[in-house]
Image: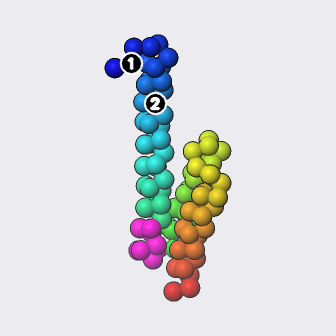
Amino acid sequence: MAHHKSAKKRILQTAVRTERNRYYRTRIKNITKAVHEAVAAADKAAATTAFATANKQIHSLVSKGFIKKTTAARKVSRLHKMVNAIEAA
């Protein structure tokens, strides 16, 4: 266990950050999962709605500094490609 005041503070800060990061990682997974399920069901309306939500949420995580802009762009691009593939099929 930590003996210094600063080390104790770091432990608390790490715990808070870990909890926050776990929430955001899970949020991204659930958002993308909703889009994947709508695409699998070939439901264009549900997929479009889920994609719009995913796009907004993922880019809000960029503004919070959780993920990089390029990572968000890659994730959104792949989801958008899947949603557009419903129309083509």
Q: Count up the numbered dots.
A: 2
What's under tag 1, amino acid-wise?
Answer: Ala
Say whether residue 60 is visible.
Answer: no
Callout 2 amino acid:
Thr
Element type at mark 1: loop
Q: Which residue is mark 1?
A: 2
Residue 68 in sight from this viewpoint: yes
Which portion, as a residue range, is magenta?
A: 36-43
Q: Which of the numbered marks, if any, corresponds to residue 68?
A: none
Residue behind mark 2: 14
Q: Nearer the viewer, residue 3 or 77?
A: 3
Residue at the farthest bottom position: 89
- The x, y position of residue 39, in whole percent, is 46, 72
- Disc 2 on helix, strand or loop? helix
Q: Position of residue 48 (x, y in %)?
A: 56, 67
Q: Residues within 10 Å of mark 2 (few under 14, many from 20)?
A: few
